[in-house]
Image (tube, rainbow, N blue to C red):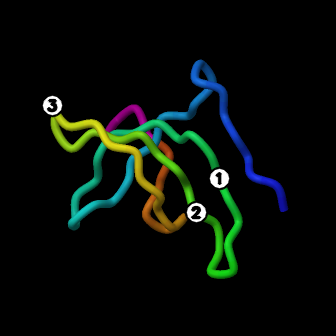
Amino acid sequence: MRPVVYRPAERPEVEVLVDGRWHYGQLRMWTRHDSGWRAQVTWTRDTAENRIDSFPSERVRKLEPDR
């Protein structure tokens, strides 16, 4: 299956689970691996640290307005 890539203006807002805490991010792309789907996400640990990492699908959730 081909990767699902989002343009910068269309990237969904998500949260990623890192070290037991959920952090804000933007979904850049989904890719299929033998172990399952992985998300490439630009995410923020705090206001000064932005990162791009790959996460398994179970560590990514849609950002809900009340969170």
- 65 with respect to 47 (left or right): right
Instruction: Give the left or right position of residue 64, taking residue 49 as reference.
Output: right
Residue 30 disc label: 1
> Vertical placement of 43 versus 10: above or below?
below
What residue range appears in magenta? 63-67
Question: Which amino acid lies under the numbered mark 3 shown in the image of this protein?
Answer: Ala
Q: Earlier in the sequence, mark 1 or mark 3?
A: 1
Residue 22 place in picture, x, y as percent: 28, 53
Q: Determine which quarter of the picture holds residue 34.
A: bottom right
| Residue at the spot 22% in from the left edge and 66% down from the top edge | 20
Q: Name the image quarter holding residue 7.
A: top right
| Residue beneath disc 2 | 38
In the foreground, 34 or 62: 34
Specify few, some or many for label 1: CA neighbours under 10 Å numbering under 14, 14-19, or 20 or more: many
Placement of 67 over or under 58, stated as above or below:
above
Residue at point 74%, 52% (across, down): 3
